[in-house]
Image (cartoon, rainbow, N blue to C red):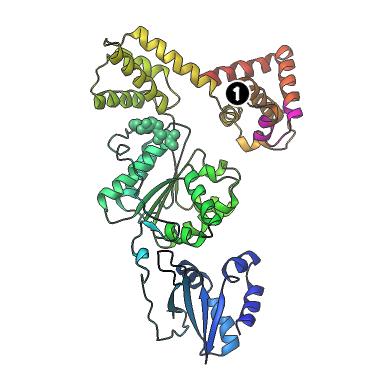
C-alpha cells in the first residue's frame, strides 16, 4: 500500500522534496484502514503535516478508501544513557478531515531532554545560553540619522517579537557600523521584557560549523529540531552563507518553521539583499518578507555623541577640541572611532598626563592610514559605481557599453592599486573575469590617464573618494 502511495506522491512533487521528505519514511504496519508510518523526528512529522497532508490524504484514500487513517510513529535515538529507541505515536491531524486514530493521544515530551529548549538533543548534552552580550544594549547604542530607522525597527521588534511585520528584520551595513551591537541590543531587550522566551544569538559562521558537524555525526534532524524550539533567532553576518548551499537549505527550513509559528528572526549582513551574491533566490525572497534596515556611516553629530558617551562611561575627561578633532578625522566607521579614542585614553593613563592635541593628531593619523590600506574590493566597486551612477551589478555585467567598460576598468585599476589582492582574485570579484582582463584594464587606465583629460579627472576624483 505504502509503495503505491509513494509512487503517486513521487509523481506529484519535486524530486528533491520527495527525496527529503518521503524516502526516509518507513511503513510499519497496516491494520484495517489504518497505515502506520515511521518518521525520523518530530520535526519531520510536523513538516509532513504542514506541507503534505493533503497529498498524503489523496494518496491514502486512493489505496484504502474514504476511511483511510494515517498514524505517525516518531523514531528518535535516545542518546542519553538509555539505549532504547524512543517512539511516540501521533495520529494524523484531522485538520483536513483526515480521521484521526483515537488510540495513542500525542505524548508530548516523552523524552525529558526535549522539555528543555536549551539542549540540543543528540548533539551535545549541554545548556545553551542566549550568547548575548549585555554590554551591547539599546541604552548605549546612540541614535543618529545614520541608524534611526534600524534602531527604531529594532526597538519595535524587541517590544513585540514575532508580532510585527518586521519578520525577519534584516540589519545591513558596512564594517563597524553597529550591526552586531544592535542585534545584541534587540536580544538583550527581549530577554529583559520576556524572560521566558528562548533567545539565541549566533554568528552565521558558527551556525554553519554546527550544521556541518551535525551532518558528520548524522544528527541533522536534531540540529533542525533544536533551532525550531527557539523563539527569537538572531543570526549575525548572513553573508557568510553565500555559496554554502547545504547551510542555506537547512536555514531555509528552519526559517520557514519559525516564521510560520510567528517566531522572530533577526539577521545582519554586510550587504543589502539585492547585492548579496551566491545566496539562493528563495532565501533572498524570504529576507525581503520583513524589513531591511540599513546602518549608514554616522554623521559628525553622531560621531561626537558616540565619543562623548564612551568617555563618560569610562570616566575619562577630554577637551572638546580633541573630541572634535577625532570626530572630524575619523569618519568611516564606529569601530575605528572607538579604537582611536581607546588608544588615546590608554596613552593618557599610561603616561599619566593629559591628552594633547599633538598626541591626538599622531594617533588619528595612524588610524586613518590603517583605514586606507584596508579598502576592500567591494568598497571600491561601490564607490566607482556610485560615482558613475550605476549599480554594482551593472558594473560587473557583461555589457560592452563604453562607459560601463570604463567604470569596470577603473574599479580593477583601483583594486590593483589599493589592495593586495592578486589579479586573478580581482578579476573573480569584479564580475568573474580572468587575470588577463584585469591586467589589460590596468594598462588601459594608465594609457588613458596620459592621453585623456576627462579620464584623468575621473582618476583624481575617485582617488580622493577612496582615500577618505
Ligand atoms: P559591525 O557588526 O557592523 O561590524 P559592531 O556592532 O561590532 O559593528 O560595532 C563596532 C563598534 O562600534 C562596537 O564597539 C559598537 O559598540 C560600536 N557602535 C556601533 N554603533 C554604535 C552606536 N550607534 N552607538 C554606540 N556605539 C556604537
Ligand atoms: Mg559584526
Pick whichever, 106 or 148, lies toward us. 106
The answer to whether residue 397 is magenta is no
Please tell me how crowded label 1 is: few (under 14), some (14-19), or many (20+) other residues with Cα within 10 Å: some
Name the image quarter holding the N terminus. bottom right
Q: Kindly tell me whether residue 144 is visible in this rendering.
A: no
Residue in the image at 36% along x and 70% along y: 109
Which residue is disc 1 drawn over?
A: 419
Eyeballing the image, is 264 above or below 313? below
Eyeballing the image, is 182 above or below 15? above
Q: Secondary structure at mark 1?
A: loop
The quarter holding residue 447 reads: top right
Where does the image place residue 358, in percent across and percent down from the top left?
36, 7
Magenta span: predominant SS is helix
State which image quarter holds ligand 1.
top left
Hey, which residue is sitting farthest bottom in the picture?
A: 32
Where does the image place residue 455, in percent across and percent down from the top left?
68, 18
- The residue segment tinted magenta is 425-438
Residue in the image at 34% along x and 64% along y: 115
Where does the image place residue 425, in percent across and percent down from the top left?
66, 31
For the image, the number of numbered tags is 1
Residue in the image at 38% along x and 50% along y: 200
Amino acid at each position: 500500500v505504502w509503495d503505491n502511495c509513494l509512487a503517486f506522491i513521487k509523481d506529484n512533487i519535486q524530486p528533491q522534496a520527495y527525496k527529503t521528505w518521503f524516502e526516509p519514511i518507513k511503513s510499519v504496519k497496516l491494520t484495517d484502514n489504518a497505515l502506520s508510518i515511521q518518521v525520523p523526528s518530530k520535526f519531520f512529522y510536523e513538516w509532513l503535516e504542514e506541507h503534505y497532508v493533503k497529498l498524503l490524504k489523496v494518496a491514502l484514500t486512493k489505496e484504502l478508501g474514504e476511511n483511510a487513517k494515517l498514524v505517525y510513529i516518531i523514531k528518535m535515538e535516545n542518546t542519553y544513557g538509555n539505549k532504547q529507541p524512543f517512539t511516540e505515536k501521533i495520529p494524523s491531524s484531522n485538520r483536513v478531515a483526515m480521521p484521526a486514530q483515537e488510540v495513542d493521544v500525542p505524548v508530548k515530551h516523552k523524552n525529558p531532554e526535549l522539555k528543555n529548549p536549551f539542549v540540543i538533543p543528540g548533539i551535545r548534552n549541554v545548556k545553551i545560553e542566549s550568547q548575548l552580550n549585555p554590554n551591547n544594549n539599546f541604552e548605549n547604542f546612540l541614535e543618529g540619522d545614520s541608524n534611526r530607522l534600524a534602531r527604531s525597527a529594532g526597538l519595535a521588534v524587541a517590544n513585540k517579537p514575532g508580532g510585527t511585520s518586521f519578520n525577519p528584520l534584516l540589519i545591513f551595513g558596512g564594517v563597524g557600523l553597529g550591526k552586531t551591537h544592535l542585534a545584541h541590543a534587540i536580544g538583550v531587550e527581549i530577554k529583559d521584557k520576556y524572560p521566558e522566551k528562548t533567545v539565541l544569538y549566533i554568528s552565521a559562521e558558527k551556525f554553519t560549523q554546527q550544521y556541518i558537524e551535525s551532518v558528520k555525526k548524522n544528527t541533522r534532524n536534531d540540529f533542525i529540531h533544536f533551532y525550531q524550539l527557539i523563539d527569537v533567532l538572531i543570526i549575525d553576518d548572513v553573508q557568510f552563507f553565500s555559496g554554502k548551499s547545504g547551510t542555506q537549505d537547512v536555514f531555509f527550513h528552519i526559517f520557514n518553521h519559525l516564521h510560520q509559528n510567528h517566531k522572530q528572526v533577526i539577521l545582519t549582513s554586510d550587504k543589502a539583499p539585492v547585492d548579496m551574491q551566491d545566496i539562493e533566490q528563495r532565501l533572498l525572497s524570504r529576507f525581503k518578507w520583513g524589513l531591511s534596515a540599513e546602518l549608514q556611516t554616522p554623521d559628525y553629530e553622531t560621531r561626537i555623541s558616540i565619543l562623548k558617551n564612551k568617555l563618560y562611561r569610562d570616566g575619562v575627561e577630554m577637551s572638546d577640541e580633541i573630541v572634535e578633532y577625532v570626530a572630524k578625522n575619523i569618519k568611516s566607521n564606529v569601530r575605528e572611532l572607538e579604537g582611536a579614542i581607546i588608544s588615546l585614553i590608554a596613552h593618557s593613563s599610561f603616561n599619566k598626563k593629559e591628552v594633547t592635541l599633538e598626541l591626538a593628531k599622531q594617533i588619528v593619523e595612524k588610524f586613518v592610514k590603517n583605514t586606507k590600506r584596508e579598502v576592500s574590493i567591494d568598497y571600491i566597486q561601490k564607490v566607482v559605481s556610485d560615482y558613475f551612477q550605476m549599480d554594482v551589478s551593472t558594473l560587473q555585467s557583461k555589457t560592452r557599453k563604453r562607459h560601463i567598460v570604463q567604470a569596470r576598468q577603473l574599479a580593477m585599476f583601483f583594486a590593483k592599486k589599493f589592495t593586495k589582492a592578486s589579479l586573478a582574485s580581482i578579476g573573480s570579484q569584479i564580475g568573474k573575469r580572468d587575470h588577463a582582463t584585469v591586467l589589460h584594464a590596468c594598462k588601459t587606465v594608465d594609457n588613458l590617464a596620459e592621453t585623456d583629460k576627462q579620464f584623468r579627472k575621473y582618476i583624481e576624483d575617485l582617488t580622493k573618494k577612496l582615500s577618505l
